[in-house]
Amino acid sequence: IKIMINLIPQRASKLIIFLAYFILFSGCNASTAEHLNSYSKVTIVLPDGTHVPTYIAETRDQQTKGLSAIMPKDFKASEAMLFPEKEMMMRQFWMPNTHFDLDVIFMNADYYVLDIHRKVKHFPREPKFKGEVPLSKTVFSQHVLEIKASSELSKLIQPGMQLKMMKSQNP
């Protein structure tokens, strides 16, 4: 390898290193929210009539990805993500590769808020082992809503509230 490097003129080697770096990291400039385009959307309506545009993580793959790798600029404080299930069960969420703290809102089948875990800490990298990643509390629930902990809308949601779900008008 040393012989090969010596054969390449100094400028060419710098150009090759630059191009390799550019190719390797050019994908980082793309929107981190691209995978959100595949999610269906609904509107969650709070008791005071406030509308919250909400992504639905319907498939196991979508639920696994959730808000991982989404940068704060790509997920508005006025948005949420819903993780629905077909039945009540013990639910707990973990936050690998997240870039903002979340409020995790646990609901029953009728979108009645059972419990909320506020300010679950973000973890902005892939974990080396599962135990190092912040976990939400475990709650017997059916649907779970995630919203930025810094969101003013999240602060409006309290246990005992009945939320409603409307199909979004936008495709």
Image: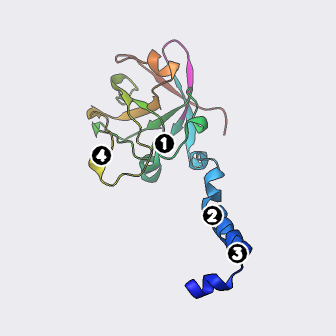
User: Label for residue 124?
Assistant: none
Q: Residues within 10 Å of mark 2 (few under 14, many from 20)?
A: few
Q: Amino acid at mark 2?
A: Tyr
* Disc 3 + disc 1, Cβ < 8 Å: no
Measure the C-alpha gap from mark 1 to mark 4.
Answer: 18 Å
Q: Nearer the viewer, mark 3 or mark 1?
A: 3
The residue furthest top is 48
Q: Secondary structure at mark 4?
A: helix
Label 1: element kind: loop
Residue 18 falls left or right of residue 84: right
| Mark closest to the chain's N terminus, 1 or 4 | 1
Label 3 sits on a secondary structure element that is: helix
Which residue is nearer to you in this view: 68 or 105? 68
Q: Of discs 3 and 2, which sits in the foreground?
A: 3
Which quadrant of the view contains residue 9? bottom right
Q: Amino acid at mark 1?
A: Leu
Q: Real-space Cα distance between discs 1 and 2?
A: 27 Å
Q: Of residues 87 and 138, which is closer to you in this image? A: 138
Q: Would you say residue 48 sits in the magenta stretch?
A: yes
Q: Amino acid at mark 4?
A: Glu
Residue 34 lies left or right of residue 81; in this view the side is: right
Residue kind at label 3, given as amino acid type: Gln
Task: Tell which tag, 1 or 4, sits nearer the viewer.
Answer: 4
| 130 versus 51 height, above or below | below
In this view of the protein, can residue 1 be seen by the observer? no
What number is the disc on residue 67? Answer: 1
Name which quarter of the figure residue 93 lies in: top left
The count of marks equals 4
Label annotation for residue 10: 3
Q: Disc 3 versus disc 2: distance between alpha carbons?
A: 17 Å
